[in-house]
Amino acid sequence: MSKSRIKEFQESREKLNQIVMKYAGANTKRFYNIDWQAYNAGTLPAKTKELLGLVASLVLRCDDCIMYHLIRCHEEGISDSELEEAFSIGLIVGGSITIPHLRRAWQAWDEMQTEQSSGNAANK
Amino acid sequence: MSKSRIKEFQESREKLNQIVMKYAGANTKRFYNIDWQAYNAGTLPAKTKELLGLVASLVLRCDDCIMYHLIRCHEEGISDSELEEAFSIGLIVGGSITIPHLRRAWQAWDEMQTEQSSGNAANK
Amino acid sequence: MSKSRIKEFQESREKLNQIVMKYAGANTKRFYNIDWQAYNAGTLPAKTKELLGLVASLVLRCDDCIMYHLIRCHEEGISDSELEEAFSIGLIVGGSITIPHLRRAWQAWDEMQTEQSSGNAANK
Amino acid sequence: MSKSRIKEFQESREKLNQIVMKYAGANTKRFYNIDWQAYNAGTLPAKTKELLGLVASLVLRCDDCIMYHLIRCHEEGISDSELEEAFSIGLIVGGSITIPHLRRAWQAWDEMQTEQSSGNAANK
Amino acid sequence: MSKSRIKEFQESREKLNQIVMKYAGANTKRFYNIDWQAYNAGTLPAKTKELLGLVASLVLRCDDCIMYHLIRCHEEGISDSELEEAFSIGLIVGGSITIPHLRRAWQAWDEMQTEQSSGNAANK
Amino acid sequence: MSKSRIKEFQESREKLNQIVMKYAGANTKRFYNIDWQAYNAGTLPAKTKELLGLVASLVLRCDDCIMYHLIRCHEEGISDSELEEAFSIGLIVGGSITIPHLRRAWQAWDEMQTEQSSGNAANK
């Protein structure tokens, strides 16, 4: 995902979450709260937690969840080969049914990496 | 969903079902028939049955099925808080992987409720 | 399930939950807490909420979860035909892959109902 | 599965289905009926239909359903290598999460084949 | 799917697979390799294997996977009634939650069949 | 799991895998091979890979797979709090439907830890 696509993804997600919160009862609000806290660095670093969220999202085959954690992995500085090793575990556990999601995930990752490196080049 | 989006959803669904029926054998036709009858009011009211279909669709994470039952819930006069309590059970049983579906569902519901209340206002 | 099997099920569940709590961090404890609260009567009666939990458990095919909600449905006084209508929605949404779970669920229900009615007879 | 284990499996299944039928409403009965008819030979031979049911049961990971279709595949005279090719598709589509089910399925198949060939030898 | 839509689907798939391969490690490459080989004719004909892949994809509810195998089924000369019998097994095993996927699949199949027959007519 | 239960689990698994290999074709053998290699230390340490396999197994709700990775996590020296943080992500992503699996997993882990610490005490 290019930076503009990431921004669009995040703004749309934020806007819809506000609609959820408009109607949310106490349990839904608490769920959102622990969902947020579970990925904070603890004994496991945030990077590992994001990889866990990413692979769980891959084997359950949820594109939105994959994209969210992929952006977070990028922010945490996960490398191409770390991502590939995590994804290969998801692919093997979850089977070829995960491949369409993997394709879209790698396309998004490739855009992030390409834009970053051209941005780095432009900054020199 | 606005009334026009609901209409579009229902017409597209109807058109595709006609293609299914063009090819359907006896078992598929019978399946469609019992799928239709299962939600008729019986010992349980139609309203409860639609909530059951809705929560089953949420935990199995099927947007089309969620939208169908959400429209039916609206027709049955289910309230915001009834919907929220049902959705919170789906969220807790099915986990955060259901959240993208919840977001789209609440957005659709919000449109239905907003249009209805502005329609009511306009009628006064 | 006979009363003795229900008791055994509940005691085993309780014992294992204590092991979970021995290790549980704040997020897991909070999750357990909202999982407990979600089924309390609210705008929807407890009976409807248990049926929602039951059908969600059926389509996700978790025997332990089905048994838990089935016992709760029995406590809430749900009738045979209410249960049947809820299960038939789960069967149609979730398909024949749910049938082994339905078989075990009806067997447990049949035991509960048989014991209850013979108990009632004995009390007369 | 040995012949005695197969018989036990089938009798237990039959006994539980009778409990389901004791409570079943019209929709559940119709569902059972189409579930039965869907595997009858049609344009596709019964053998192919049983393989379809088997692989669907494998990727959805239901041991009871796998055992049922495995026994039917055996009755239809499916060969070891036909079974292996079907299972390998299920394994690749569904991933390593299917392996525990594959293990139990091959163990059951091995028992059926071993008993059959020793039976054949005994008959000579 | 019309021929142009099929071509578009295949080109997009190919383009994304190239991005996957840009990053793929040895395990991912081997997975792709066995995924490719599993559908080659063996003891089971390619036609049966494509139906197995199709029904597995239907019950796991992956549109991209369904479309891929549907195109392959068309290439293998599978008839309308063979497809219908396979799909009816998927529908019964997987339940009504598969119906939105069935609708899209039959629409795509109907386009392929319609274009083919009008193409045949035009060639006379 | 006590050491004797772990040994029993591993021996049963090994015995059944030998039956799978008795029938396995080339694709199944290759699948087993990459399944084995995917968890070897690479850019990501073995410990992280086992946690990824564990959480993927939890959200897909496969007890055998969970037990396998749990034993491996124990061998890799993962701590109680690392495990708890990983499990809490699985619980939140996958929902309360994972709880019966979590209960069995923590029971097994508690046995491993208890036996280990009493073993350590005995060695002093």
Image: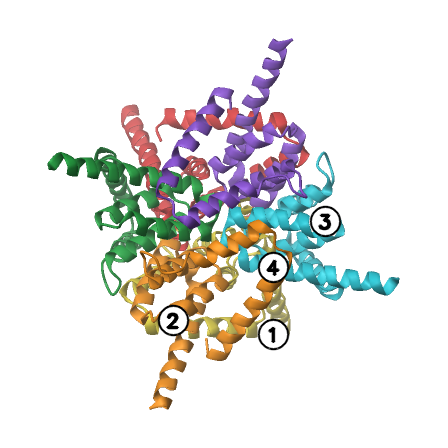
Chain colours: A red, B purple, C cyan, D orange, E green, F yellow
- Do the residues marked 4 and 3 share a common chain? no
Give yes or no for contact between labels 2 and 4 (Cβ–Cβ under 8 Å): no
Tell me the crowding category of disc 2: few under 14, some 14 to 19, or many 20 or more residues within 10 angstroms, Cα based.
some
Give percent across and percent down for residue C47. Answer: 71, 44
Query: In the figure, residue E12 lies in which quadrant?
Result: top left
Tell me the crowding category of disc 3: few under 14, some 14 to 19, or many 20 or more residues within 10 angstroms, Cα based.
some
The chain to which mark 1 is attached is F
Please state which amino acid type lies under the numbered disc 4. Val
Residue A108, disc: none
- Taking depth in this image into account, of D91 and D26 the one nearest to the observer is D26
The chain to which mark 2 is attached is D
Residue F123, disc: 1
Give percent across and percent down for residue E79. Answer: 27, 49
Tell me the crowding category of disc 4: few under 14, some 14 to 19, or many 20 or more residues within 10 angstroms, Cα based.
many
Question: For the residues marked 1 and 3, what is the alpha-carbon distance in whole angstroms?
Answer: 57 Å
Q: Residue furthest right?
A: C124
Horizontally, residue F94 falls left or right of residue C52, namely left
